[in-house]
Image (cartoon, coloured by chain):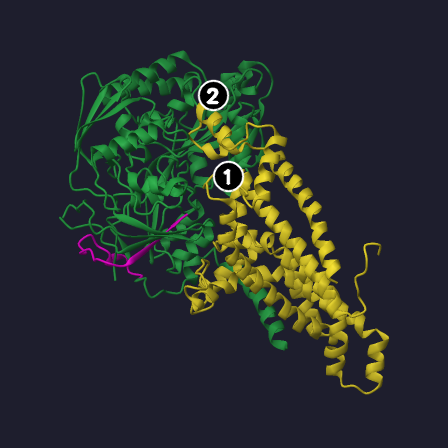
Amino acid sequence: MTQYILRRLLLMIPVAFLVTVGIFVLVRLAPGDPVLAYLGEEKDPVSIAAVRREFGLDQPLPVQYVAWLSHALRGDLGRSFHTKQPVIEAITERLPATFELGAAAILISVTLALLVGTLSAVKRNSAVDLLTSSVTLMGVSFPNFFLALLLILLFSYVVPGRIFPPGGYVPLTQDVADNLRRLVLPAVTLATASLAVNLRQVRSSLIDAFGQDYIRTARAKGLAERPVIFRHALKNALIPVVTIIGIQTGAIIEGAFITETIFFWPGVGRLAVQAIPSGDYPIVQGVVLVSALSFMLSTLVVDVLYAFLDPRISYGSARS
Amino acid sequence: MTVPSRVLALIGPLALLVAACGPAAPSGGVAPTAGATGAPAAATAADKPLRGGTLTFSINADITDMDPMRSRLFVDRNLMYQMYDSLVRIDAKGQIIPWLAEKWTVSDDGKTYTFSLRKDVKFHDGSPFDAEAVKFNLDRASKTEGSARRGELTPVDSVSVVDASTVKVALKSPFAPFLSLLVDRAGMMVSRKVVEAAGADFTRKAFKAGTGPFILTEAVKDSHYTFEKNADWWYKAPNGDKLPYLDKVVVKPISDGDVRLTNIRTGQVHATNTITGKDVPVVKADPTLLYKEIGAYSWDSLIPNRTKGFVFEEPRYIKAVSMAIDRQEILEKGPAQGVGVVAWGPIAPSHFAFDAGFKPFAKGDPAGAKKLVTDVGKGPLKFELLVSSGNAATLQLAQLIQSQLAKADITADIKTMLFNDIVTLQGQKKHPGMTLIGWSGRIDPDGNFYDHVRTGGPNNDSAYSNTQVDDLLDQQRAATTEAKRTELLRKAQQIFVVDDPARVWFSFGVAQLLMTREVQGVEPYPDQLPRLHTGWLKK
């Protein structure tokens, strides 16, 4: 297993390299001149030339790339064109907010998916199943920004007591209660889309499992329904669910782009949303790189988890 | 286990219900908050200002730079007006008034300005504000590589210290709008000690850098900025009260207009200066809120490309577009919903040179426009209208213009693009037809169009060139009286709007302020920036 993990970690190097080439080129392929975006209303030819030089954009693309990569390898992703903040600092100071939001969303999504998905699978084609199916469909169909606004309006004007404020962030370290109050709406918004996917996955995996011989055997030997579901069916149905959750964990950063913007949640997603249209290349490159690395790491964790969930899975040599 | 599904089942229909009736009839759905009195009549001018409290103000985007020398975004200035003082300021009518400079004299040839500075001013870090500080700041702004103020301070030749409280600025040639530049970022004073200690971080950590009414004490990007009262501030209210009244100001960037409004209506935020047109009737009808607006310097325009080989190389086509549109209808039925003022040219109502009688195309004249296009003799006029994507209001505006032009048989093909892409394209003078882009406005009329119509000007995106206009614009810069400048500016405006059009101006913006009824003493200024030093909170 250790060998497998090491091999996967080593494989990440060429992948990360390809990712860096990809983002570097893609960011620059997008039309629009970051220098003009930066200069705004004060754009005279002298400033344009000076800023282009300052940003290093007067160099040929390969030179720019090598310069960026050599700094990146030393842990320096450059400075934001606009705020001049070091990219690493800009990302790390926003990571706690993004992780808190992402973790809360996944927690909500997974808990509900397991509870409701199991119920739907057990009571297949019943009214409950139908209802969850339709609500699920709505969850997938509602764009995040729309659901976010609905929740804000709902808790501001309809539900009395204004328990959940319409956006904003207070660090957990500063005020736990206020932090949690502000976390609920964005976390629910973010959870909804993945909830639908997770719930359907739990339901269909369980239904698959129910059709397996070992379940029939378990029932035939007189086992009560509860242990049949939880001890036998659910555990075996979890493998595809873990895969999806793993992917969602890796995708926390990009998943939160819109939600963070609407709820003015100071996370990495909001940072990227501001950087993309203004052509703040160092920030965009940094966020995509960190996001890609977290994605690769989370898939590795998922693969390792498989072996624990299902002892039949083992990882062999490179030949396999 | 049934609980979650029940909750989910409830949220769906309820959410739809809110979507259906929430924004359309908002005042009906508002539960009264503890802070809101709901009694507009209760707020009278006779109320004695109360001291203390924290006012939360929302801006519509996060700032990028706190350094007045580097700042390039309008939104940055919302913060700067709380923490920095400038040499001169404007009053609510746009007149220049003394500020850190108590008085000044201008030499007869208009080339030397001598400023007498206040002697009772200190920076937040304790360092003294004097002539040396002014020299440091003006030199820094006009000479530093990468300074965003270099362009506007080009007329400055040298700055010299006469004595501790007198500073002399020599200009290369007479430049009438000079004082107006010192109202804003070019005239804002920062502490040398703080700037040098902070280095590259000054752009986002300008703590204790100003002399203004509030001291920046905390900056959390994308979340909030906290200011504490400067107890030693020099400025006093007309009634002799020491200012500011407020203990603290918190500024929060909230980019979504609906969320910003909801934050005000639920008492999370006290005030904002950006309200979308569709929400204005709603907030005006809301007894818990107070909405104020005055005319601003900003304008909106259609920018043609007059470069050879492009459609609008033919100036009569630009005039045809200008004639065909109905500006009143654009203002009232467009996304502005009546919030704003009809514009014929770039000189705004708050400018001294404004001409209320200048209405060259008084009403939409599709027949006249059609005739003009026929006179050109090259068949029907068809062009591409580039519109910034991701903004429903801008698209709606473009569609309204498109429908008005259709009445004159002019076809505008709307194409959406990222704002940055449009700016790039028009900067290279490669936009095929017209673009739809505005200007945030300047205090002096010169700043509202010199760079946009002067041959080779940095913002001359329509590639306009008219020697007569160039001459008139240069002459007004050298003129010493407002009367003379007014005459020359108006002459130029007649040419670049009507006779040989550079652009199609159609509306001026307004300076807005939306506040809860608790907030008192804050008024809108034509530059659209909040002055919170006179504000106070009613209990």
Name the foreground residue: B58 vs A304: A304
Counting from the top left corner in percent of width and height, residue A268 is at 53, 51
Give the quadrant of residue B110.
top left
Counting from the top left corner in percent of width and height, residue B455 is at 43, 17
Q: Quadrant of the C terminus of chain B?
A: bottom left
Seen at 64% across and 50% down, the residue is: A292
Which residue is label 1 attached to? Answer: B394
Label 1, label 2: how far apart the Cα atoms are = 22 Å
State the SS at label 1.
Answer: helix
User: Where does the magenta region start and end?
Assistant: B38-59
Q: Colour of chain A?
A: yellow
Q: Nearer the viewer, mark 1 or mark 2?
A: 1
Q: Is residue B199 left or right of residue A55?
A: left
As drawn, B159 above or below A100: above
Question: Can residue B363 be spotted in the picture?
Answer: yes
Name the foreground residue: B434 vs B236: B236
Q: Is residue B77 magenta?
A: no
Q: Amino acid at mark 1?
A: Thr
Q: Chain of mark 1?
A: B
Indicate which disc, 1 or 2, sits on the residue closer to the N terminus.
Answer: 2
Q: Amino acid at mark 2?
A: Lys
Residue furthest toward the top?
A: B467
Q: Colour of chain B?
A: green
**Residue neighbourhood size for the residue with mark 2, other residues' Cα within 10 Å, grouped as few (<14), some (14–19), many (≥20):** many
**Residue B319 image label:** 2
Q: Is residue B55 magenta?
A: yes
Residue furthest toward the left?
A: B240
Question: Can residue A123 be spotted in the picture?
Answer: no
As drawn, B4 above or below B30: below
